Image (cartoon, coloured by chain):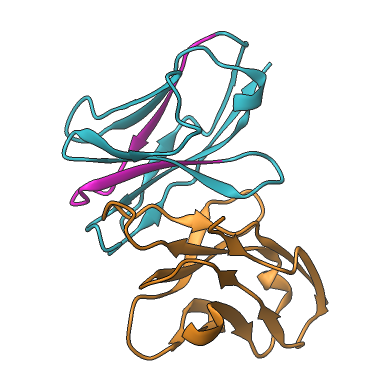
Chain colours: A cyan, B orange
Amino acid sequence: EPEVTQTPSHQVTQMGQEVILRCVPISNHLYFYWYRQILGQKVEFLVSFYNNEISEKSEIFDDQFSVERPDGSNFTLKIRSTKLEDSAMYFCASSESWQGAGYTFGSGTRLTVV
Amino acid sequence: AQSVSQHNHHVILSEAASLELGCNYSYGGTVNLFWYVQYPGQHLQLLLKYFSGDPLVKGIKGFEAEFIKSKFSFNLRKPSVQWSDTAEYFCAVNPPFSGGYNKLIFGAGTRLAVHP
């Protein structure tokens, strides 16, 4: 079964450093998403991406965050200057259509900011 | 505020007991509904989803859910749980008019512990 792949599985970074979280969506999917889950809290939508541009973002997704699809396969989330409160599990997802066909989550990257 | 509510935060059951986890949402209009499971240390896995048609949806691992439009509910059920069902369960809604780009709004989750 096709998978969404995320790397690394765990990243530790110092406060103020930039991090890039990487995702390889399912190859025929056109819609890409990032979500995060702070420990003990609900999964929260960050951003959706289609046709090489952000289609929707939440209030969490401020100027410190950016997304990019640098080539035909990767989809990245960059946090410019990490804060302690950015520590969370970050999930990438992709879907085949805007109606949600094939909506699949990756296994997540646990980001720890120290 | 529009939201997804899961009323049970922690549920403890013995094996073979029946399970029902509540999910209510506050969005009007047509919504798509999902239940995800997250086993310890693992990613979100889709259990089942409802887009339209028969409001009783069957998913993987013997789970089912019933969409009751008048109650804005999408409760998850399983007739007989197993120890391996120990996990966290998330209800999610794809709200209408979300730009057509399909974000999911998640409930807070229900942590299920099944004792042998």
Residue A82 in percent (x, y) is at 56, 16
Quadrant assignment for the N terminus of chain B: bottom right
Residue at the spot x=49%, y=61% of the render? B45
Residue B44 in percent (x, y) is at 52, 56
Judging depth in this view, the residue of A20 and B15 nearest the camera is A20
**On screen, residue A55 above or below A18:** below
Does the magenta segment cover residue A24?
A: yes
Residue at the spot x=45%, y=25% of the render? A62
**Image quadrant where residue B28 sits:** bottom left
Residue furthest to the top in view is A16
Residue A20 in percent (x, y) is at 42, 21
Residue B95 in percent (x, y) is at 40, 61
* Residues rendered magenta in the picture: A17-36
Does the magenta segment cover residue A34?
A: yes
Quadrant assignment for the C terminus of chain B: bottom right
**Image quadrant where residue A87 sits:** top right
